[in-house]
Amino acid sequence: MQTLSNIDSLLHFSPEILLVIFAAAVIILDLIVKDDESVAVAYLSLVGLGCVFAAVLIIHFSFRNPVSLFEGMIRLDEFSTFFKILLLLATAATVLFSLRSEELDARLKGEYYALLLAITLGMFLMASSTNLLMIFISLETVSLTSYILAGFLTHSPRSSEAAFKYITYGAVASGTMLFGLSLLFGMAGTGDLTQIGGRLTELLASGEVAPLAVLIAITFVLAGVGYKIASVPFHMWSPDVYEGAPIPITAFLSVASKSAGFALFIRFFYTGFGATGLMEAVDWPFMLAIVSALTMTVGNLAALPQQNVKRLLAYSSIAHGGYLLMGGVLLTSEGVGAILFYLLVYLFMNLGAFYVVILVANEIGSETTDGYRGLSSRAPLVAWAMVIFLVSLAGIPPFAGFFGKWILFTAVLEQGYYWLALVGLLNSVISLYYYARIVKAMFFEDAGAEAASVSFSTGTFALLSVFVIPTIFIGFLNIFYTFSNISVSVIPMQ
Amino acid sequence: MTLQHYLVISAILFTLGIFAVLTRRNAISILMGIELILNSCNLNFAAFSRFMTPEDISGQIIAIFGIVLAAAEAAVFLAIILAIYREFGSIRPNEVDTLKG
């Protein structure tokens, strides 16, 4: 692995630099344009995301070998490129959602888009950091920005309350994580993730470090990572925050924040401890298997009685975090590849479902399942799109969600975690019930006599099809699965 | 003073911070608890850097970054507390409870 000095790294770092430049440009443009032209700010941030996307691809294809930047602080490889593309798609979708959402105050939109670009920068760094300091800084960048975005509707009590709960849980979780990182740093004597695992293995073998100390440190770090991916027992913030935050931000947090959390999780556990003999002393995969089983069970059971669709999707998102964690306990490249593929599928189906929630909130003015009554006759295309997203989320063939789950469960079974696969399967069956409840409301319940049909613009349908088409076809195209498998080839395995 | 002294103090600070967050009924006190947690981490980093790797100062650098992030977090937390006070007329967490289920 080539390690570059600070100056040499700048060229490889250009996507992140572009993000900073465009975030600044968005703020400046916001000062120049008049209030009623604030759409220009959104378009500028879309252009910025496009430029960053191009830069990511150019860098990827011109420097094919993985390199370590800034003296080993962050790493540029296929794995980070995969997540950068994923996160850029999620951010671009969020900008488009925000343009169409009627919740947001037009006058404040400049800051809003600048914060979205800043949070993308933080997530880029989360996906590529290989140093304890960088891990903590990137996590805090993402967290602090998402607290502000969750509370962005300052005139709404729900939004302020969401931000308050988010920062209270988040600050404690990240403080606990920092404490764990400090213990790891102290035991290993280095902040470099690639060396920590090896040093700890040596120290454990010679008896200088007690296994319990390492276990405590890893558990503390898991508090921070687990809070980002909303795994039990650090999931309590997520339903409240998802319900109170503006819907585009809810969609963004449920997809991008979770993806970045998983990127950090895979980097930390696999690059740090994957290829070492640490497991013999500290059985963290088993600990994660328990967390995974609990996460999906709690998520699915709590989703059953929910009436608010945002809250229902929040619990569904917790449950999906549980399914994804299954891939993380396997210590095989199939398992991690399955996580990446499922995240890609999840991006399209979950963002699509949230887009329908935005449309219904805009036009019908309701976030509860009652608002979805009779949607099949009021807006048939939107209702059918929602059916595709929900069926895919439940994992029913022939949609992408089924293929994602299939690959994930196959990887789990191959490693002999039969009980975990069984728990996952039972949970998928439970999840059918609450997804079907929305479908039932849309197709088999009457909206009442006064409900007129709702019409949407062509742009709405175009954006909707951007999510519907991948949800239908990704599973049939090998290229996406190959893409996610190539991306994990740089992660060290047993 | 040995490394153990520092570690014991930082463990006590961390526990006090968690205790404050769990038991206090005022948002400002919760913020103080969070600051205690973050400062215990900074103390840990500085102490480990001094005693375990005396020739390498990266632990002390991490502590400086930790202070900066703690300040940023306090700023955001105070802003959110202000928003809460405007909406609810109170900064007691158990009165800020409209989202549930």
Image (cartoon, rainbow, N blue to C red):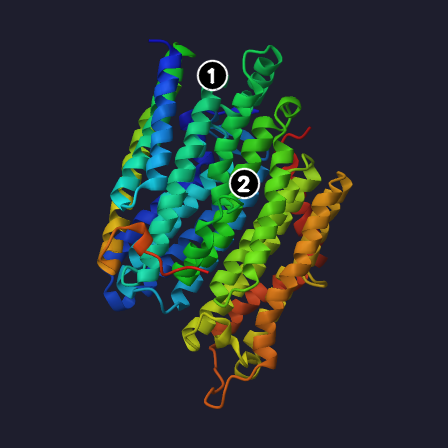
Residue A62 in view: no
**Please, what secondary structure does the residue beneath circle 1 have?**
loop
User: Which one is nearer the viewer's eye here, A68 or B49?
Assistant: B49
| Picture disc at residue A189 | 1
User: Residue A416: where, in percent of width, then height?
Assistant: 76, 39
Q: Amino acid at mark 2?
A: Ala
The residue at the far bottom in this view is A449
Q: Write the residue at 40% across / 16% down.
A: B48
Left or right of residue A155: residue B14? right
**Please, what secondary structure does the residue beneath circle 2 have?**
helix
Name the quadrant of the C terminus of chain A: top right
The image quadrant of residue B63 is top left
Indicate the chain on which mark 1 is placed: A
Indicate the chain on which mark 2 is placed: A
The residue that label 2 is drawn on is: A263
User: Which one is nearer the viewer's eye here, A347 or A12?
Assistant: A347
Residue A383 in view: yes
